[in-house]
């Protein structure tokens, strides 16, 4: 079968590999009908998160049809339409039973302290072969699959494999409640869905920060008040917009590949730029950019700094942008001075997805407008390159695998 395979930083290929088969009784084999490329995948190719094991199939977002189930999988049958949750979880351990399925004690082969286990990630997360392939072995299938209601299409469901639940989870981590003014850093597709989630949770105002014009336009189309950080200083503008108090809640949907402004009043001083450069050296020592491709973010802590500076005293920050274990800089002192609450993490997909699926099934939440590109599997590498360069219009690519 065809699959997108990680060979090294800056080196991904569409390879032919063997079809997967059932290994454990708790496995299922799913024929993938849709997959998708996520901002998280870019971290692995840019070298800002790892280490990856060569040969790992990339991707952690898919929907498909169950082909075969192991004998311990009692609740699914061949032919069922399913979402494959990005994160793998057993459903049995104490963490899973508390709903914390991204911190399952059992699913990660590296042991209970290794943290989140997910498809297509670094060695420390499994590694499990990912979902940008024609077939996939799903471990702990009873908990890692979510059934798709008949009136929800594959295109709607693919956005519930990771990004809509993650965005919603981010709004919950930030404690968004009715009346809040919320700032969302990053207007990639996760940021866009975080804006939508903040509105659904009753936010009164949403402010979106990025510097990609098409993404800011899409945020404005959702009625967010937008700030282009290459022409305005987000800290100053947010102060002006909130009578100096700052926002009640921040959702960080940027992560480790954060960038600093290259122009405008918020561009870093020479000293600040040097500090960012040493962060990049620490985070991505093996990065191998090729021209403008696979370039790591030049300021890993930029979004964290702005989040802390622009949130109100006693404010709340929810971090869903992914930061690798190599990131050690966070403005903790400034946060302390403001009595902030900061929560973060990988989405507990198994727990978060089902209620959202109901919102989609009833028409209360339509994720379809957030798919901006469709590609066949054969053009997957091309699609990665457009997405990596943040080419206009490449917000979210769904791979038509079937
Ligand atoms: N926690 C989870 O479970 C989970 C799940 C999925 C994705 N993620 C993470 O969410 C993040 C966003 O994913 P995506 O698919 O939208 O990625 P993306 O790369 O498409 O979007 C990131 C956006 O951030 C913007 N940006 C860069 N520096 C910025 C700054 N200083 N301030 C504001 N915006 C800035 C970029 O221009 C880009 O539009 C990634 O880090 C991804 O790994 C986390
Ligand atoms: Zn994802
Ligand atoms: Zn578990």
Image (cartoon, grey):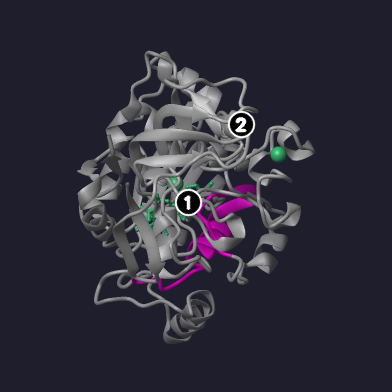
Q: Is residue 275 above or below residue 345?
A: below
Q: Quadrant of residue 362?
A: top left
Q: Is mark 1 within 8 Å of ligand 2?
A: no
On residue 129, the disc is 1
Magenta range is 295-324
Check disc 2 and report its element: helix, strand or loop. Answer: helix
On residue 143, the disc is 2
Disc 2 to disc 1, C-alpha distance = 17 Å
Q: Nearer the viewer, residue 5 or 388?
A: 5
Check disc 1 and report its element: helix, strand or loop. Answer: loop
Q: Nearer the viewer, residue 254 or 288?
A: 288
| Residue at 39% across, 30% down | 64
Q: How far from the left and from the top, in percent, is residue 235?
A: 47, 60
| Residue at 54% across, 57% down | 307
In the displayed structure image, the side of residue 386 where residue 20 appears, left or right: right
Q: Is mark 2 within 8 Å of ligand 3?
A: yes
| Residue at 64% across, 48% down | 315
On residue 232, the disc is none
* Local crowd size for mark 1, using a 10 Å CA cut-off: few (<14), some (14–19), many (≥20): many
Q: Is residue 306 above or below residue 260?
A: above
């Amino acid at each position: 079968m065809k699959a997108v395979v990680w060979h090294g930083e800056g080196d991904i290929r569409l390879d032919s590999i063997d079809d997967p088969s059932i290994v454990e009784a708790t496995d299922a084999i799913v024929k993938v009908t849709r997959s998708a490329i996520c901002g998280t995948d870019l971290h692995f190719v840019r070298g800002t998160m790892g280490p990856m094991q060569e040969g790992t199939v990339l991707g952690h977002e898919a929907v498909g049809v169950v082909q075969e189930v192991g004998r311990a999988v009692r609740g699914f049958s061949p032919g069922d339409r399913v979402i494959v949750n990005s994160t793998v979880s057993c459903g049995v351990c104490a963490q899973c039973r508390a709903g914390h399925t991204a911190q399952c004690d059992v699913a990660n082969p590296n042991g209970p302290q290794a943290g989140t286990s997910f498809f297509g990630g670094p060695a420390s997360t499994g590694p499990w072969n990912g979902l940008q392939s024609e077939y996939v072995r799903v471990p702990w299938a009873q908990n890692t699959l979510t059934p798709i209601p008949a009136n929800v299409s594959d295109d709607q469901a693919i956005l519930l494999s990771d990004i809509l639940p993650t965005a919603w989870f981010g709004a919950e981590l930030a404690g968004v409640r009715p009346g809040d003014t919320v700032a969302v850093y990053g207007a990639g597709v996760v940021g866009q869905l975080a804006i939508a989630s903040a509105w659904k949770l009753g936010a009164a105002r949403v402010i979106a920060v990025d510097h990609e014009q098409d993404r800011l336009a899409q945020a404005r189309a959702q009625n967010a008040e937008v700030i282009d950080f290459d022409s305005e200083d987000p800290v100053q503008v947010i102060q002006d917009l909130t009578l100096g108090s700052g926002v009640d809640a921040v959702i960080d949907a940027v992560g480790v590949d954060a960038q600093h402004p290259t122009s405008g009043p918020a561009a870093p001083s020479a000293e600040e730029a040097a500090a960012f450069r040493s962060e990049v050296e620490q985070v991505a020592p093996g990065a191998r950019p090729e021209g403008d491709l696979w370039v790591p973010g030049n300021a890993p802590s930029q979004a964290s700094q702005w989040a802390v500076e622009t949130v109100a005293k006693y404010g709340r920050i929810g971090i869903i942008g992914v930061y690798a274990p190599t990131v050690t800089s966070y403005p903790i002192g400034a946060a302390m001075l403001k009595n902030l609450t900061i929560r973060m993490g990988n989405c507990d997909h198994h727990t978060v997805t089902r209620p959202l699926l109901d919102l989609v099934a009833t028409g209360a939440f339509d994720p379809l407008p957030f798919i901006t590109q469709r590609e066949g599997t054969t053009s997957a590498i091309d699609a990665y390159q457009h997405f990596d360069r943040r080419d206009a219009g490449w917000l979210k690519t769904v791979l038509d695998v079937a």
